[in-house]
Image (cartoon, helix red, strand yellow):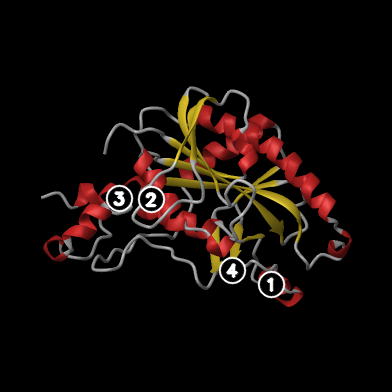
Amino acid sequence: MSEARAEIGIIGGSGLYEMEGFSDVREEFVDTPFGRPSDAFMLGMLEGRKVAFLPRHARGHRILPHELNFQANLYAMKKLGVDRILSVSAVGSLKEKFAPLHMVIPDQFVDRTLTRKSTFFGRGLVAHVGFARPFCASLSAVMQQSCVEAGVTHHPGGTYVCIEGPHFSTRAESELYRSWGMDIIGMTNLQEAKLAREAEICYVTLALVTDYDCWHPDHDSVTVETVVANLVQNAANAKQVLRAAIRRIPAGGERSCECASALKNAIMTAPNVIPEPLKRELAPIVGKYLKS
């Protein structure tokens, strides 16, 4: 791989790259074997580090959650040289203590999606990565410390139930998830985390609570204006957290977490039977394990 054009990736709403101090910004479209990512990447310097920002739903919010090309988005991050991703997303709360405007740094997932592509593998190459701990513990600790530094109300740990969308849950579904002990609900982060692990990229989510899910007795009184206002305020706070996180991430690229070697014992297919075109296609991800 050529010299990295970025070392830290940010995936989130398009307003997040409009951060004070994000300099030398340029746009770059990244081609991938899986098609086009959501949008052009914004590449630049932030807090002295090379950062790549991707608006998850494209600028103007044009892509539904189940329409996102997760494979292209994560492959492009890897191709750019990113080894750590800070993901920011809006979520609903399934517990009273996770109130609107709070932030959650989840440590677990439950998958309720139906149609998403969650792996780079197949087509003659089999790999099974460990996913018991779906978020990078080291990066989660950085995010928690950054929330403290930014002075935001946050909750370390919690289970994110990822639903298919684009519709929100029924009341019965919301109550079911609560009975399972779920904490927050969203539509986007699970596939990002799975593909990041396959690509040996550290991944963490900063979940921004915009409102309570439909289980809450006050849910029907929530207006669109309230949700939008919460999104704007949360985005402003998230910028502070992200800048603090980037300052705290160790420079130099050395990582001791399990994410950094997730594929070491995961590839099951004998190298001599893997199709050569597939080896070339996935070289940014598997190349170091399939050298001749």
Which structural element holds mark 4? loop
Disc 3: which residue: 285
> Is 243 or 60 nearer to us in this picture?
60
Label 4 crowding class (10 Å Cα cut-off): few <14, some 14-19, many 20+? Answer: some
**First-in-chain label (1 vs 2):** 2
Depth check, mark 1 against mark 4: the one in front is 4
* Proximity of marks 1 and 2: CB atoms separated by less than 8 Å: no
39 up-or-down from 191: above or below: above
Q: Between marks 1 and 2, how big is the CA–CA gap?
A: 36 Å
Q: Amino acid at mark 1?
A: Ser
Residue identifier under label 2:
75
Mark 3 lies on a secondary structure that is helix
Disc 2: CA contacts within 10 A as few (<14), some (14-19) or many (>=20): many
Can see residue 264? no
| Badge nearest the viewer, 3 or 2 | 2
- The amino acid pointed to by label 3 is Ile
Query: What is the quadrant of residue 162 in the picture?
Result: bottom right
**Counting residues from the N terminus, which is met first, the one under dot 4 or under dot 2?**
2
> In the image shown, does 180 or 169 lie closer to the viewer?
169
Marks 3 and 2 sit apart, C-alpha to C-alpha, by: 8 Å
Q: Which residue is mark 1?
A: 179
Q: Which mark is residue 164?
A: 4
